[in-house]
Image (tube, coloured by chain):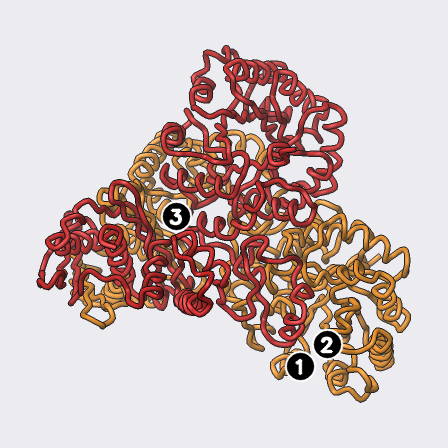
Chain colours: A red, B orange
Amino acid sequence: MDLHGAFHVYDTTLRDGAQQEGLNLSVADKLTIAKQLDGLGVGYIEGGWPGANPKDTEFFRRAQEELDLQHARLAAFGATRRAGVRAADDPLVAALRDSGAGVVTLVAKSHDRHVELALRTTLEENLAMVRDTVTHLREEGQTVFLDAEHFFDGYQANRAYALEVLRTAAEAGAEVVALCDTNGGMLPDWVSDVVLDVIDTTGARVGIHAHNDSGCAVANSLAAVNAGATHVQGCINGYGERTGNADLVTVVANLELKLDRSVLPQGLLREATRIAHAVAEVTNFPPASRQPYVGTSAFAHKAGLHASAIKVDPNLYQHMDPLDIGNDMRLLVSDMAGRASIELKGRELGFDLSHDRELVTRVTDRVKELEQRGYTFEAADASFELLLAEEVEGTRPSYFDVESWRVITETRTGGEAISEATVKLKAEGVRYVVTGEGNGPVNALDAALREAIGQAFPEVAKFELIDYKVRILDQGHGTDAITRVLIETSDGQSSWVTVGVGANVIEASWGALVDGLTFGLRRQHG
Amino acid sequence: MDLHGAFHVYDTTLRDGAQQEGLNLSVADKLTIAKQLDGLGVGYIEGGWPGANPKDTEFFRRAQEELDLQHARLAAFGATRRAGVRAADDPLVAALRDSGAGVVTLVAKSHDRHVELALRTTLEENLAMVRDTVTHLREEGQTVFLDAEHFFDGYQANRAYALEVLRTAAEAGAEVVALCDTNGGMLPDWVSDVVLDVIDTTGARVGIHAHNDSGCAVANSLAAVNAGATHVQGCINGYGERTGNADLVTVVANLELKLDRSVLPQGLLREATRIAHAVAEVTNFPPASRQPYVGTSAFAHKAGLHASAIKVDPNLYQHMDPLDIGNDMRLLVSDMAGRASIELKGRELGFDLSHDRELVTRVTDRVKELEQRGYTFEAADASFELLLAEEVEGTRPSYFDVESWRVITETRTGGEAISEATVKLKAEGVRYVVTGEGNGPVNALDAALREAIGQAFPEVAKFELIDYKVRILDQGHGTDAITRVLIETSDGQSSWVTVGVGANVIEASWGALVDGLTFGLRRQHG
């Protein structure tokens, strides 16, 4: 029996998660996150609302070309048809139909006052909107899920009507009716009672969509599942509007590890820590260290009294084996990298480290030391590969020697700012002094560096800096902060990410630029 | 009937909360936090472990002299006597007895394997240790609570023994037996079952002490209360080891606002947001914006579509009235912003726009236009307020005229990078040419700018750049990208966020810096 298919793990990071204050995702960010979520093995990825804004429309267009999902199906989110028009004639419904997504998640009002005040239509017309839209999309061959917005509040205000909305959707062919605690104020016992009643009364397949306003999003999701829900919506890292949506990884880990339900493909839960952190790099929200299961502090123990007992039996001091979620017990502060993950990562990059214990120790120690200084390798595979190559081969791959660099940015009243960089380096025995311009200091440095190296290695002309991310560590101490820069470089065929760290943002960027070019050259020259 | 006395709200921030990775509290910090917790009206404040470390001993000494608690009683935490000695002869027990605290919370092992492996004594002797220590402290006139460590795991391993520990403590005079989910892996239904059994079997007054490892600390605490517990332990802001303890404010808010239990003195819950943030200032952990109830995002709404319905009835879009917890609804100005949300946002900032339709249109159009160019105002209230002031007052608030600026960053082989900025500007009729240094280009510009302006406006010496965030928009086209910078500036009392945008990251930073100083000066000068 395909348990993965039987239970729906449904991620809405790209739509509801993006409602979080300060969270802004580009189309490229969304595609990257979708790939990560697929790697976690979620069953459904809600990509956005095609037709409602150009960014989401573009996401679905590019997803068809660029996303090769192994586990997940893509879902398009959107509303039922407007009042008074045929579903087939509503351009927003058409955008869902034509999105290329196999699944459409239709949001519908199920709270009588919201129908009247927000939709400004009659309760009867709202039912017709649900019925028509579900029917139309089903006829067009799409799977339809219904998100019953404000369901729990609506159920309290007018139980009969709220249930009627669900029944209408299910009868028209919606595969799931997801009960949304849109305002997030529910408590587990209340959720449980409502889910039991809904299943009993309507016979529909029920899903749960919880927000964390009462600090119970995870528990509410579990309460719904215990009461019979077989579809759980949430966001990785608990992103979402206000206090966030249910943290999907925590929910899934509780289901798999505590309630013995296989809801992800075998073995993929072990990727959760890595993936949660990789997504945090894309959103540029620092991962919460105290996040359940995947936080860097989640299995961190202050050394001392417990240490000897932990040696006897670590399970005396942890609620589960952290390896099951890809995390690690830590006895010392910033002991981030485990040997096992280094070995696994090495294998992923084509280095078999399993028979060289000393090498693994050396790499693990260096990663720990560098991570303590602010580096992160979770999202910077290329820098990690250079480090690994250095330890395996004895010297760091290097194709040029930098003598010095300088960059000036200046402006005048009313004028645009301009940046100019000068780089002095030796490559293939020749000394180059090159000045480059750019619309920012890093672009100017990149231009000068690539022009200088390009005289020795013409292939770098193809390289392009395609993404640049800055994170200030040690927040709250602006001037003493350490800066971490992630740079993505492309050669037109593929791309790779490198990391640089420094007290000075330009210095950190320089380190990542040099790594980025070195990695690209190594690919060509070995 | 004194309901406050009937139910125990017990805060352990100063002891268990301080186990959090990276959290270090001085004695002065602890005294400050204790005053804040008393202001919230908690019944008990666990101050630390006197005798176990000099800092906690000093805290209890100074607390007797300096703390004038209105609502709370101070509790000293410590262990039962060592094996094989009389309670009266154990110096650690004596330290508890002599701490001056009216309440002692004794931690005892209730898991058989922990007794054998960590305490290295017999199950029988452990019971004697509980009995003797409770008896001794009761005879000395102290109230005693028992923290049954690893209780839930112990109950699963050896129910009879775990219950026997509780029974022994209760019979010796412990007023409360608190069941500790020390490893934090419980789920609400399990907690509920165990609490029901404990009350049924022992008749003891039961407390709950939950950790958040399964993301259910709040729900587990509520499940225990629903099953009959009348004593809840937790930490403000959910501080604590690993994933943290139950967030006491969230638990209390759920009890008071959702379950109709008066557990704090009348009216004090409205202080919770202020107090939670004040404590965060002391711990130097930035308050989590998505924290339930008290987070700055907890009642923040992004969706423009909702704004018109919010005007009709805000309760349609929030699970409770934020004023009940001292928080406030906030509308985020985003590119989906309609006229309604601009109007509401203006009111929030003290501008009544309701009678000037043309002004609202102008502001809405400018916000849309600026957001299209990469600005975001949802996280940059200060920049939005400057924009609003400009439209309302006809000119943009301005305290200085910039002539030009320049910043150089350079390095040499093996050397650190250094940044140096020169700013030329006029303020109060005087021209300033100032050079500043920094560990990055933005810090150097900030230093030069503040030094120049500081000669005209000395109060800017208090301003500090406390956070800096960079986003590259239009990813996938590295060199054509637009950069967005968010800068948070503090004057020591409060902080504000400004936004800058430009093709050049330094230019974008400059815009945000200038806005940040202008906003701060406007506050002082109007």
Type of amino acid at the residue the image marks with label 1: Ala
Task: Classify mark 2: residues with Cα within 10 Å, few (<14), some (14-19) or many (20+).
Answer: many
Type of amino acid at the residue the image marks with label 2: Gly
Q: Residue at 35% across / 57% down in the picture?
A: A385
- Viewer-nearest residue: B391 or B230: B230
Residue B380 is marked as: 3
Q: Are marks 2 and 1 in contact (CB under 8 Å)?
A: yes
- Viewer-nearest residue: A184 or B521: A184
| Residue B327, position as x, y percentages in the image | 57, 49
Quadrant in the picture for the N terminus of chain A: top right
With B197 as the anchor, is B437 left or right in this view? left
Q: Quadrant of residue A198?
A: top right
Query: Nearer the observer, disc 2 or disc 3?
Result: 2
Badge 1 and badge 3 in a common chain: yes
Residue A169 is marked as: none
Compared to residue A398, the image places residue A182 above or below, namely above
Give me the chain letter of mark 3. B
- In space, the residues marked 2 and 3 are separated at their CA atoms by 47 Å
